[in-house]
Image (tube, helix red, strand yellow):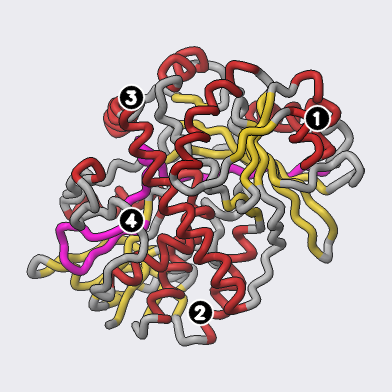
């Protein structure tokens, strides 16, 4: 089949790669000049199956209320006259029950474990290099309340096959000596040895090279203006290139992988996607003192930050990313939030990074209320979804890409997950109908 993939981020690129592997003629369309130039450009870098507890959990409503109006809050709802924001917020609250949280963790862990395996297999098969580190991920806690709150989710993840081990503060320092500076504040930690980290943007660029060599066509600097329906199916995509020239691009099947823009393109087709943009931030620092900088990828759950380290020919870099601001499609970089991240880094690892050369970045992440992404079919028989991954697009990229390629090909996915528009494996895993 001729398959058109809309979006050249992590999800679009992996979808295209696996679709080509199954024998399809694939074209990818993206408005940027290079792949993974938006949501995945400077993300946190973690392949983090252990980061499976959704934002929507029993403790979230009170925290959100406490954080309202605080410019440096880890999760900030910036209240707007925006019906989509309010509807999303109501759905978010419905996902905060213990039962829904357990269900969502189950979905996120299953997909994450499978996706990590697919990434490792892809790396073995192709020799891809993207500044990866396979030293695991360490979640650390600087308050007893946050540590205690992590125990039950960690236990559930272990039951699902994600070995997120609960360890003491001293054990955490043995794994990551750079944490010794804050030993008096450490309440405890969890450690998942199988988790990884790496430069998502570099991964996407390297995978595009492989895909192009195999015959995938990339139409970069092409802005999709509409998906046109005829006879109950998508007939073609309308797009303009960077010189304003209009094109109609036809295909047999279409994969919508446009991140936070996905609901805007689906809505005219009568398909309502519960996705809202969550603006995330990152700071990239050159390593200033290697003896003070972390080696292992870290997660600071209290501040909603993740820490990765990249080693390349140009030198070592620290990438710290996280927080979320729900403020529509606003892309302005808020210096207060960036500086709050730098302050936290200096509290934890003073002198490790060169803060004078800090590079700030912000991007819109496509968040569902449950944090469970939308992968699968829509009511239109030739339109498929691979979107809504929120903060876990990198973690879920390879598993999502391979799964949607199989679904488009009429094959069953290899992972037990509540795929959109498809029979669920059990009654409790039924996905809300789309459209």
Give me the C-alpha separation between circle 1 and circle 2: 41 Å
Q: Find disc 3 in the rendering and name its residue.
A: 97
Asked if labels 2 and 1 touch by Cβ distance under 8 angstroms, the answer is: no
Q: In the shown orientation, is residue 422 left or right of residue 328?
A: left
Residue 346 has which mark? 1
Q: Earlier in the sequence, mark 1 or mark 2?
A: 2
Q: Earlier in the sequence, mark 3 or mark 4?
A: 3
For the point 58% across and 42% down, the residue is: 362
> Looking at the picture, how far across and down is residue 19, in whole percent?
38, 76
SS assignment at label 1: helix
Dot 2 crowding, Cα within 10 Å, few <14, some 14–19, many 20+: many
Q: Is residue 276 visible?
A: no
> Looking at the picture, how far across and down is residue 317, in whole percent?
78, 51
Asked if labels 4 and 3 touch by Cβ distance under 8 angstroms, the answer is: no
SS assignment at label 2: helix
Q: Is residue 270 above or below residue 51?
A: below
Which quadrant holds the N terminus? bottom left
Q: Earlier in the sequence, mark 4 or mark 1?
A: 1
Q: Earlier in the sequence, mark 2 or mark 4?
A: 2
Q: Find disc 2 in the rendering and name its residue.
A: 211
């Amino acid at each position: 089949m001729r398959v058109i993939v809309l979006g050249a981020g992590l999800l679009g690129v992996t979808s295209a790669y696996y679709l080509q592997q199954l024998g399809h003629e694939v074209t990818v369309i993206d408005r940027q000049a290079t792949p993974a130039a938006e949501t995945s450009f400077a993300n946190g870098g973690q392949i983090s199956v252990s980061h499976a507890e959704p934002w929507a959990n029993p403790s979230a409503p009170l925290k959100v209320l406490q954080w309202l109006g605080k410019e440096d809050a880890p999760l900030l709802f910036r209240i707007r006259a925006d019906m989509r924001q309010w509807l999303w917020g109501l759905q978010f609250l419905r996902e905060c029950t213990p039962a829904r949280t357990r269900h969502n963790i189950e979905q996120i862990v299953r997909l994450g474990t499978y996706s990590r395996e697919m990434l490792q297999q892809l790396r073995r098969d192709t020799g891809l290099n993207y500044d990866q580190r396979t030293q695991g991920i360490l979640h650390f806690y600087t308050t007893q309340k946050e540590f205690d709150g992590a125990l039950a989710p960690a236990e559930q993840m272990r039951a699902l096959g994600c070995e997120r081990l609960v360890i003491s503060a001293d054990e955490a320092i043995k794994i990551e000596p750079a944490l010794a500076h804050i030993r008096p504040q450490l309440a405890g930690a969890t450690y998942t040895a199988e988790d990884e980290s790496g430069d998502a943007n570099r991964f996407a660029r390297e995978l595009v090279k492989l895909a192009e060599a195999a015959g995938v066509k990339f139409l970069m600097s092409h802005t999709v203006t509409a998906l046109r329906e005829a006879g109950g199916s998508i007939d073609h995509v309308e797009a303009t290139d960077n010189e304003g020239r209009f094109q109609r691009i036809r295909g047999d099947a279409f994969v919508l992988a446009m991140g936070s823009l996905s609901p805007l393109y689906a809505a005219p087709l009568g398909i309502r996607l519960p996705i809202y943009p969550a603006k995330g931030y990152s700071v990239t620092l050159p390593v200033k003192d290697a003896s003070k900088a972390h080696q292992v990828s870290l997660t600071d759950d209290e501040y909603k930050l993740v820490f990765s380290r990249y080693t390349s020919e140009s030198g070592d870099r620290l990438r710290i990313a996280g927080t979320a601001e729900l403020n529509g499609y606003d892309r302005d970089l808020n210096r207060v939030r960036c500086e709050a991240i730098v302050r936290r880094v200096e509290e934890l690892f003073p002198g490790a990074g060169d803060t004078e050369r800090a590079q700030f970045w912000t991007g819109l992440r496509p968040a569902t209320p449950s944090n469970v992404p939308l992968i699968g079919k829509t009511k239109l028989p030739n339109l498929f979804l691979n979107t809504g991954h929120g903060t876990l697009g990198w973690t879920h990229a390879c598993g999502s890409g391979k799964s949607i390629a199989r679904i488009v090909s009429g094959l069953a996915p290899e992972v037990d997950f509540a795929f959109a528009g498809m029979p669920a494996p059990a009654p409790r895993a039924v996905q809300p109908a789309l459209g």
